[in-house]
Image (tube, coloured by chain):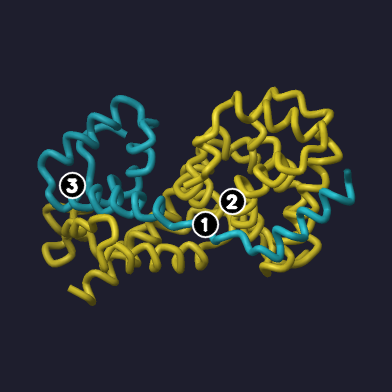
Chain colours: A cyan, B yellow
Amino acid sequence: MTGSMDCNELVELVTAYLDGSLDLEDRARFDTHLLECDGCASYLQQFRSTVDTIGKVALDELDPTFRGKLMNAFRDWR
Amino acid sequence: MLLAMTTTAGDEAGLVEALRDRDESAFAELVDLHTPAMLRVARGYVRSREIAEDVVQETWIAVLKGINAFEGRSSLRTWLFTILINIAKRRGMRERRDADVAVIAFTGGTVDPARFRGSDDPYPGHWKPDEVPSPFPDTPEGSVLGDELITLARRELDKLPERQRLVVTMRDMLGLESAEVCDLLDISIANQRVLLHRGRAAVRQAFEDYLRETT
């Protein structure tokens, strides 16, 4: 696809953009659209902020009882 | 984030060596390092925490039995997760054989199409004036809003379809590279990206709704 990019196309390409996997043509259309569209600039900021927050979700603490079971399995193996 | 990223290849080789010598403290260290992430990934395949624990235990036993055959061509983590996913997949399929294992069908956009102008508008496909996104507020470490959003993200991740949840968990929570995720899940780069994008977009939408209500 060539020519300018519409907002509803841009929103589907954000992950590819952030991964650096858009081809150069699409990347240029994406960047050009951002220059003139505050809404999409905000959308990109929201998306980055979302990814950042997902990265802060902590893994559950290891349950000591389950850990004990694993250690017992080790002793059985040894 | 995954603790494993802070260990170096040298530490890892040492731990593998110690495990071959049946060193209990090396096993304990590996368990503490990898088990929380393994449980999280296993939960993407099976319905309950108990079954996920079974899967993880079975994985560790398989790892112990196979440790002499581990050649270190991949990282230990990749090897662990490959074993885990095989076991989890088998277990998950047995659990719900008739469940709809959805192949990715493109079911439309990740943003409500009603937010964009129609084809009769001079700017079709652009945001409607009252639907333009506004930036999310900054949420410094430990801020109340930041903590609320982290809680919300966790809840929304649990609601995602299985494969979206797995990809988002591996990429954004555990910090795996896309090539590693594709190998582990045996999917193409393009499919991985679609799943990642849809999952992230669903969480973004939940954030937007939440922020609109609370601010």
The reply to whether dot 2 and dot 1 touch (C-beta < 8 Å) is yes
**In the displayed structure, does residue B202 sit left or right of residue B8?**
left
The residue under label 2 is B37
Res B195 visible:
no
Provide the secondary structure element on which disc 3 rests: helix
Q: Amino acid at mark 2?
A: Ala
Q: Quadrant of the C terminus of chain B?
A: bottom left
**Picture residue at 30% right of the left edge, 25% below the top:** A24
Chain bearing mark 2: B
Chain bearing mark 3: A
Specify the quadrant of the image occupied by residue B185: top right
* Dot 2 and dot 1 within a common chain: no
Res A6 visible:
yes
**In the displayed structure, does residue B186 sit left or right of residue B114?**
right
Q: Position of residue B194 (x, y in %)?
A: 47, 46
The reply to whether dot 3 and dot 2 touch (C-beta < 8 Å) is no
CA separation, marks 3 and 1? 31 Å
**In the displayed structure, does residue B89 sit left or right of residue B161?**
right
Q: Amino acid at mark 1?
A: Leu
Task: Identify whether B208 is placed above or below B194.
Answer: below
Bin the neighbour count of mark 3 within 10 Å (Cα to Cα): few under 14, some 14-19, many 20 and up: some
In depth, the one of B9 and B53 nearer the eye is B9
Q: Position of residue B81 (x, y in %)?
A: 67, 43
Q: In the rendered structure, find residue B211 and report the number of the disc placed on it.
A: none
**Picture residue at 79% right of the left edge, 41% below the top:** B63
The residue under label 1 is A59
Q: In the rendered structure, find residue A41 and report the number of the disc placed on it.
A: 3
